[in-house]
Image: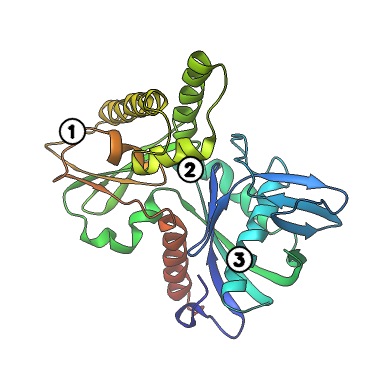
């Protein structure tokens, strides 16, 4: 988020970007993590990035799961779009940017240096979003563990044993904290994100109707619990969502979750499924359904690190 309180100096800003498999989030924007590239200006544009002589239409669909986000150029372009959206909101066309991003907990040691190099490949970047030119100088990239960033702003207030469960589109990240201090030995990444629930719903729809359901309608049910559709189709989505919520809670128990002995904080976009379809003790489970929480947390962590280094 670009605000006066986060300015390092004129035009020097921290921007947090949560580069999910389903959606790209900043402190103020959210769009689907889909990229379609064209050599020529496409007729139907939507959100479009022009960079390196190519046209990238973004946000039309989710990107397929890949463990290493530096395998292709897609996440680089998606990150440029995220930066531009924050800059536009601040009325800026040039910025010296310190990027704050994250990767799954158990992959951070393996991926951190490579992903930082990927995002810093071009220190000076000129590109266009929806016809408007943006010029960015990447001043640095800091990479934090997913899940932890969501609770970072209030971690000092966490007492006793707390389990954090970050449910993204591609993965679930779990970590355990004791009085706000994380345990490296109790950090887990599992490929059981919301996309797995979506796949199962679409398989049921194919069995019942011979066709898949409109993804936006399915997402509406997962987020709100209902949508304008037939009762049979609605019942299928709710049934599969309930099974998924039960599976997530079962996974947490396998990883050591004991409701009477610890508090559970569920974060990430998939938290809505647990909220709407899960079985849990509301007095001991906190669900943060702010989809921008990770991006805000990355900014908070980056701000603190730069302050400690005397850079602010």
Q: State the residue position of label 3.
A: 85
- Which element carries disc 3, helix, strand or loop? helix
Q: Residues within 10 Å of mark 2 (few under 14, many from 20)?
A: many
Sequence order check: which comes first, mark 3 or mark 1?
3
Q: CA distance from mark 3 to mark 1?
A: 41 Å
271 to 53, vertically: above or below: above
**Residue 18 placement (x, y as % from top left):** 51, 53
- Which element carries disc 1, helix, strand or loop? loop
| Residue shown at the point (38%, 24%) measured from the top left | 240
Q: State the residue position of label 2.
A: 104
| Residue shown at the point (39%, 38%) measured from the top left | 222
**Residue 52 placement (x, y as % from top left):** 83, 57
Q: Are marks 2 and 3 in contact (CB under 8 Å)?
A: no
| Residue 195 placement, left or right of 276 | right
Sequence order check: which comes first, mark 2 or mark 3?
3
Q: Residues within 10 Å of mark 3 (few under 14, many from 20)?
A: some
Q: Are marks 1 and 2 in contact (CB under 8 Å)?
A: no
Q: Quadrant of residue 257?
A: top left
Q: Residues within 10 Å of mark 1 (few under 14, many from 20)?
A: some
**Residue 132 placement (x, y as % from top left):** 74, 70
131 to 95, vertically: above or below: above
Q: Looking at the image, what colour scheme do you see?
A: rainbow
Q: CA distance from mark 1 to mark 2?
A: 23 Å
- Which element carries disc 2, helix, strand or loop? loop
**Residue 221 placement (x, y as % from top left):** 40, 38
Sequence order check: which comes first, mark 1 or mark 2?
2
Q: Is residue 184 visible?
A: no
Q: CA distance from mark 2 to mark 3?
A: 24 Å
Residue situated in front as seen by the camera: 267 or 237: 237
133 to 296, vertically: above or below: below
| Residue shown at the point (69%, 59%) measured from the top left | 120
Q: State the residue position of label 1.
A: 258
């Amino acid at each position: 988020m670009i605000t006066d309180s986060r300015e390092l100096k004129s035009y020097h800003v921290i921007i947090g970007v949560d580069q999910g498999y389903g959606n790209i989030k900043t402190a103020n924007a959210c769009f689907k993590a889909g990229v379609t590239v064209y050599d020529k200006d496409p007729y139907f544009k939507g959100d479009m990035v022009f960079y390196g002589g190519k046209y990238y239409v973004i946000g039309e669909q989710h990107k397929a799961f890949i463990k290493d986000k530096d395998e292709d150029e897609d996440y680089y372009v998606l990150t440029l779009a995220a930066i531009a959206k924050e800059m536009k909101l601040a009325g800026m066309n040039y910025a010296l940017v310190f990027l704050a991003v994250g990767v799954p907990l158990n992959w951070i040691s393996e991926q951190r240096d490579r992903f930082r190099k990927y995002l810093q490949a071009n220190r000076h970047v000129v590109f266009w979003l929806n016809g408007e030119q943006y010029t960015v100088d990447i001043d640095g990239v800091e990479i934090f563990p997913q899940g932890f960033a969501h609770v970072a702003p209030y971690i000092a207030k966490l007492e006793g044993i707390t389990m954090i469960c970050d449910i993204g589109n591609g993965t679930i990240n779990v970590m355990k904290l004791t009085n706000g201090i994380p345990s490296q030995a109790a950090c887990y990444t599992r490929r059981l994100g919301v996309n797995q629930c979506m796949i199962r719903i679409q398989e049921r729809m194919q069995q019942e109707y011979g066709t898949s359901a409109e993804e936006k309608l399915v997402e509406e049910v997962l987020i709100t619990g209902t949508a304008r559709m037939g009762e049979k189709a609605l019942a299928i989505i709710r049934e599969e969502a309930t099974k998924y919520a039960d599976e997530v809670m079962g996974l947490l128990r396998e990883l050591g979750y004991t409701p009477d002995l610890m508090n559970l904080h569920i974060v990430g976009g998939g938290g809505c499924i647990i909220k709407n379809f899960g079985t849990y003790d509301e007095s001991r489970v906190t669900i943060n359904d702010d989809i921008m929480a990770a991006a805000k947390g990355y900014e908070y962590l980056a701000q603190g690190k730069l302050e400690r280094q005397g850079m602010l």
